[in-house]
Amino acid sequence: MNSNRSAGKAAWMPDETCDDRSSPYFSAEHEILRAQIRRFVETEIKPQAQAWESAGFVPREVLRHMGKLGFLGIRYPAEYGGSEMDTLASVVLAEELGRSTYGGVAITVLVHTDMASVHIYNSATQAIKDRLMPDIISGTKIVAVAITEPDAGSDVKSIRTTARPNGKEYRLNGTKMFVTNGVNADLYCVAAKTGQDERPSQNISMFLVEKDAPGFRVAKKLEKHGWRSSDTAELIFEDCRIPTSNLLGAEGRGFHAIMHNFQNERIVMGAMAMGEAKAAIDLTLDWTKQRHAFGSPLWSKQTIRQRLAMLAAKVEAGRRLTFHAAWLNSHRIEATKEVSMVKAYCGELVNEVMYTCLQFHGGMGFMQESAIERMARDARVHTIGGGATEVMLEEVAKRMHTASD
């Protein structure tokens, strides 16, 4: 909602499907945004996204359309075409994309908006920001973030990719794995080691690598269990040459930048998971009312009604936990414990919901023609990506221990 904002209020007013209008967390502007995204999901994503699952990526024209509507610049300054909104606006975007039932589409967008391009906006030189941010917000250029390696996932300090200065350039060497948007991105924010003797948290830096950088290549497209409409790649850097001006922030501050943005990333993934869970319950409610067994609808069985009711209660609790963490983050209040709770709770809960909803769909839930089959596959990665559940629970536990001292 950039330059279209005032026009958008007339064209995209909230309707009865936007169920958080009375929430203490969301303003009228948030709900206008929610209505606009929900309309886009219904008219532009759901009718076409099955083809994107087969193709393995979201077409660039779709992303440019989202850019034109302002969805890719929600948090960025108006000078670049953004809307200058807050963390709660990212929650709205993530939840509504999650409700699309296509996790691969949702993560394609959210990596670009909330996990990758933020490194450029937060840390690039003014000249680079002025050159690239308008294209990022319009969807003309898509961004990926390359941190994970074959032997380093949540343990960011263990990365092995190196960047060594060589005159007016850095030379990057190493491999990055499981990079979302990695096949088709134009810009890559890459974590690499720039020091040897310092503490691990002080020898990692972030770099901007453009698609045509000498020595950079996409090694292969990776085929996945879920998120199949999201392109994922292994990347290779072999004496990849980039100008020193492509260092993002100060040398040795990359680990801190990654950890800082993990807060936003984990909130967004929690919101996405709760959008998926709510959509799954809605689908299953419709199915159980229509599907007959032993002479009556499944919905007439007390155990099914009550199990879905309890899951609905858990999802509402997860949503409120996510909203609160986003509110804390938007007010710059320390919220590592709450954000870690969001990531752990919502990631596990969405899988519990999908398991039950697929079960209640019976044999049809096991067929690829059913939405719930795809959604169950897509949900599995929520306990892994962006910080595994076990890592998140340790973050919570550490803060519980400190609070008790």
Image (cartoon, rainbow, N blue to C red):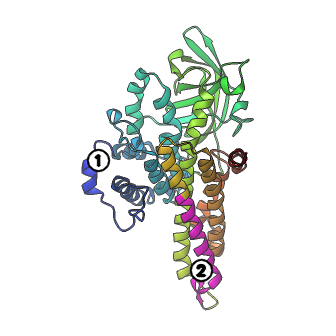
Mark sitting on residue 305: 2
Mark sitting on residue 160: none
Kind of residue sitting beneath label 1: Arg
Q: What stretch is highlighted in magenta?
A: 296-320
The answer to which quarter of the image holds residue 175 is: top right
The answer to which quarter of the image holds residue 309 is: bottom right
- Quadrant containing the C terminus is top right
Query: Residue at the front extreme?
Result: 405
Sort mark 1 into few (<14), some (14-19) or many (20+) by Cα contacts within 10 Å: some
Image location of residue 213, percent across then percent down: 54, 22
Mark sitting on residue 5: 1
With respect to residue 190, does 214 lie above or below? Answer: above
Which circle's residue, 2 or 1, is located before the other in the chain? 1
2 in magenta:
no
Q: Is residue 229 in view from this perspective? A: no
- Looking at the image, do the residues carrying marks 2 and 1 touch, with CB atoms under 8 Å apart? no
Kind of residue sitting beneath label 2: Arg
Q: Is residue 179 in view from this perspective? A: yes
Image location of residue 330, percent across then percent down: 47, 44
Q: What residue is rendered at 39% in x and 54% in y?
A: 37
Image location of residue 38, percent across then percent down: 40, 58
Q: What residue is rendered at 66% in x and 45% in y?
A: 387
SS for callout 1: helix
Which residue is more in the foreground, 262 or 96? 262
| Direction from residue 394 to residue 297 in the image, left or right | left
Image location of residue 338, percent across then percent down: 60, 50
